Image: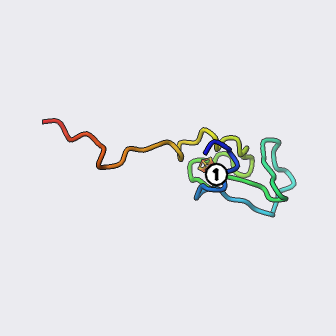
Amino acid sequence: MTDPESRHRACWYGRRTADIPVDVGSACTIEDGMLLYCGHPMWYPVVGYDFDVRSCVDCDYFRPRAKPSSRRPPPG
Ligand code: SF4
């Protein structure tokens, strides 16, 4: 999934609101009349509603992770 809007839609932290602040920054994303933002606790306190959905394309949330069964056994 490489489309940032698709990632935002699929992400648990992907949020949208119809209450668009009048002083929202220029880096925001409005889609279908809704303001898109990230509710992740590491992002939201920093960027708030000044969120550019294109940030989702490189987000670590979608970084592949190793399954526990594929991890190497501990040394020794
Ligand atoms: S930035 Fe990452 S955590 Fe936030 S909505 Fe986009 S994909 Fe989800």
Dividing the image into 4 quarters, which one contains the C terminus?
A: top left
Residue farthest bottom in this picture: 18
**Residue at image coords 20%, 40%:** 74
Q: Residue 11, position in %: x, y?
A: 60, 55
Residue farthest right in this picture: 22
Q: Is residue 12 left or right of residue 72?
A: right
Q: Toward the viewer: 8 or 2?
A: 2
**Residue at image coords 74%, 51%:** 49
Quarter of the image holding residue 3? top right
Residue farthest top in this picture: 75
Q: Look at label 1 and name its amino acid.
A: Tyr
Q: How many marks?
A: 1
Q: Residue 60, position in %: x, y?
A: 53, 42
| Residue at mark 1: C-beta within 8 A of ligand 1 | no
Q: Is residue 64 left or right of residue 13?
A: left
Q: Residue 12, position in %: x, y?
A: 58, 59
Q: Is residue 50 left or right of residue 71?
A: right
Coloring basis for residues: rainbow
Mark 1 surroundings within 10 Å by alpha-carbon count, few (fewer than 14), some (14 through 19), many (20 or more): some
Q: Which residue is mark 1?
A: 44
Residue farthest left in this picture: 76
In this rendering, the answer to whether 19 lies above or below 71 is below
In this rendering, the answer to whether 51 lies above or below 17 is above
Secondary structure under the numbered disc 1 in the rendered image:
helix
Dividing the image into 4 quarters, which one contains the N terminus?
A: top right
Q: Residue 69, position in %: x, y?
A: 29, 49
Q: Toward the viewer: 54 or 72?
A: 72
